[in-house]
Image (cartoon, grey):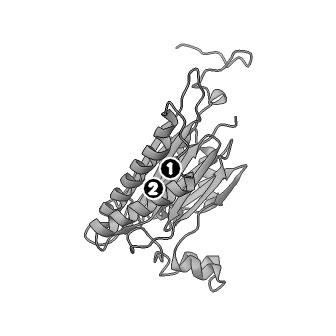
Amino acid sequence: MAKTAPLDPHVPAGESDPRARRHAVIGTANAVGVERSHNEDALVVLSGNFAGQESLPDSGLYVIADGMGGQRSGEVASSLSVRTVARRLTEQTVLRLFDLEPREDLNPLQDLVRHALEEANQTVVSRVPGGGTTLTAAVVLGEQMTIGHVGDSRAYVIRNGETKVITRDHSLVERLRELGQLTEEEAASHPQRNVLYRAIGQGANLEVDVFTLPVPRGGYLLMCSDGLWGVVTDPEILRIVADARDPQHACDELVRAANSAGGPDNITAVLVHFPSE
C-alpha cells in the first residue's frame, strides 16, 4: 500500500487544496422529496472566472424557483421563470464582462435584475394561466452580490458560525408575524403558512425585492426552497454546512435531513462558498 506524507506547509499548495482556492465553490441539490409525486422546483447555476493579461471579476448567476398550481402548472411556471431570468441576466450582465470596448449605456444592475423578474412574471401570466412560482436570483460580480426575490424561497448568508436570512418571505403568515399577530412558533405551524401574497404569475403588476450586499468572504450564500427551510431548522442547516467537506456534500446532506424530517415538499438548494481572499 502506498503511503503519503503530510502536506509540507512550506510547499505552495495547488488549486485543488482548499487552502489555495481563489474562486467560489458551488454545490447544488434538487429532489422530489418523500411525499410528492413530481418536482415543481427548478434551478439554474452559472459560474465563471477569467485568467489572463487583463483581470475580470469572478461572476456567478444562481436562480431557484418553487412552482405552484394544479395540473403541473407549477413545474411549467418554475421552469419558464428560471430560464427567462437566466437568459436575460446572462445577456445583460455576465456576457457584458467580455465586451472588448466599455459601454456607457448599461442600466444599473438592480434595475436589470428587477426587469428580468418582471419579464418572467409576464411570461408566466401569459403562458401558464393558473400557475405561479417563487423566484430568487443572485448575480455575483466581483465583490458584490445583487439579489432579486419574490415569494418564500430564501437566501441565507452563513458566516462566522451564524446563519442570517437575507430575503423576506412574501407569505401571509410572515406578514402576520411582522405585525406582531403571530409568534415565531405559531407561524411555523400555522395551517396557512404556505399562502403567498406575492409570487411570479399572480398578476400583471409585480413588486420585486432587489438589494445588493458584499460577498461574504470566508462564508456562504445559501439559496433554498421551503422544502428545506420549512422542515430543517436554521441551527441544523448551520451544523450540516459547517461539518461538510465541501458545498456539494453539504447540499446532499441537507436533502437527506429534509427527507428524514418527512420530506413533505420538493427540495432545492444552492450553496456557494466564497474564499477568504
Amino acid type shown at disc 1:
Val
* Crowd tier of the residue under label 1, counting other residues whose Cα lies within 10 Å: few below 14, some 14–19, many 20 or above: many
| Dot 2: element | strand
Amino acid type shown at disc 2:
Ile
Residue 259 visible in this rendered orientation of the protein: no
Is residue 275 placed above or below 73 in the rendered structure?
A: above
> If the image is split into quadrants, where does the C terminus sit?
top right
Residue 149 visible in this rendered orientation of the protein: yes
| Dot 1: element | strand
Q: Residue drawn 71% across and 51% down? A: 161
Taking the image as shown, residue 238 lies to the left or right of residue 29, namely right
* Crowd tier of the residue under label 2, counting other residues whose Cα lies within 10 Å: few below 14, some 14–19, many 20 or above: many
Instruction: Pick the residue in front: 160 or 253.
Output: 160
Mark 1 or 2 closer to N-term?
Answer: 2
| Residue at far front of view | 104
Hey, which quadrant is residue 110 in on the image?
Answer: bottom right
Residue 102: percent from left, percent from top: 55, 36
Residue 274: percent from left, percent from top: 62, 40
Q: Are circles 1 and 2 on residues that touch, CB within 8 Å?
A: yes
Q: Residue drawn 58% across and 20% down? A: 53
Q: Can you identify the residue that label 2 sits on?
A: 64
For the image shown, how many numbered marks are present on the structure?
2
Q: Can you identify the residue that label 1 sits on?
A: 270
